[in-house]
Image (cartoon, rainbow, N blue to C red):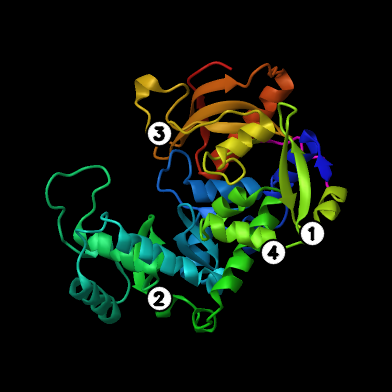
Amino acid sequence: MLEIDNRTARSLWLTTNGLSKAPTGPLDLAKIIHQLGFVQLDTIQVVSRAHHHILWSRNQNYREPMLDKALGKDRAIFEHFTHDASVLPMEFLPMWKRQFQRKKERIDRSNWYSSMLGPEGREEIKSRIRDQGPLSTHDFDTKIEGEKTMWKRPPHKLALDYMWYSGELATCHRVNFTKFYNLAERVFPSQLWDQNVDDQEQVNWLCEAAIDRLSFGNASDVHKFWEATDLDEVKSWVSEHEHLVPLRIQSHDKSWVEAFGPANIEDRLASLEKPTSRLRILNPFDPAIRDRNRLERLFGFNYRIEMFVPAAKRQWGYYVYPILEGDRFVGRIEVKADRKKGVLNVIQFWPEGKTKWTPARIQKLHGELERLARFVKVSDINWLCEI
């Protein structure tokens, strides 16, 4: 069984996630999204929304309007649900059709959408879109009935979501992150949307594509990557594919876990280069750190998002960014952009463990903050804490 020591495993994981090289050079947005598989969308804009920050971390020539253009004009990507709302390469569409059906069936079995508009109401929405063109939730006026809670949605919003999940509607474009819905056949290229791929072929593709983007993992990891397959389906796929390479991966604490890798794992290991010493401020939703257990196992970095934790109970802060240097996490930082005032506020900073913040490392952090400020078009950096 091939053994991969912890330092090599960390390097392999960062390479797989496009974080081993300096984020410079010509920008190929489609290639980055294809390499990652998907990019999670998130509405919260503390500095820059998660999807923009994730892409900028791979190439700092990226700018926020580029993703909207890829979605709304170029039709190079589409929106749907992996573990959360995400954008995916449009070419993946034929292999994603089972996910539309899976999401529809899950909603049909739940009570969450019990207050949405019925079939006639949903058909009326589609008729309006057919006649008027793309519409957003703001173009409808049904109201929440009963007590208003954080997650409760008006009937028309639930209906729009239901038809978006099931593939009847698709995101046409966004304006200031507001989603506009259109009929799926008007958004998805017919040569892709009309393809009917066997369900098992879709499962095979999803599993292969997941392990390709993980480089190593187990059946649970493959299942969690897209969340477009059931765990039993993945286990069956693993048992039937002898090309998968058995591995032992060393954890940060020196223990070993069993996993498997793609057929070309030895070639990947042979071509590995030492990760850049560039210091990066990563987004909390970055795919390299999304699986918190994997993150802690590989890097010894315990990280959780505390946005929904009451302020008095937070260990760190509302929106705290991990700081990656080379193949180590060396700190955490809480920053917030005030775009109207043109300022990036550094609210709090925490060194990680026994990491020494030498003048050279501090200078690297200042350099990354300056780059982040330019990215969101603010000119000043205001330190509200000490380093």
Are the residues flagged by discs 2 and 4 in contact, CB closer than 8 Å? no
Which is closer to the viewer, label 1 or label 2? 1
Is 275 colored magenta in this rendering? yes
Q: Which mark is residue 184?
A: 2
Quadrant of residue 256 within the rendered picture: top right
Are the residues flagged by discs 1 and 3 in contact, CB closer than 8 Å? no
Earlier-in-chain disc, 3 versus 2: 2
- Number of marks: 4
Amino acid carrying label 2: it is Ala
Secondary structure, mark 1, is loop
Spatial CA span between label 4 and label 1: 14 Å
Name the residue beneath numbered marker 1: 263
Q: Nearer the viewer, residue 96 or 59?
A: 96
Q: Residues within 10 Å of mark 4 (few under 14, many from 20)?
A: few
Spatial CA span between label 1 and label 2: 37 Å
Indicate the position of residue 32 as horizontal and vertical percent values.
Answer: 64, 57
Earlier-in-chain disc, 4 versus 1: 4
Spatial CA span between label 2 and label 4: 35 Å
Q: Which mark is residue 307?
A: 3
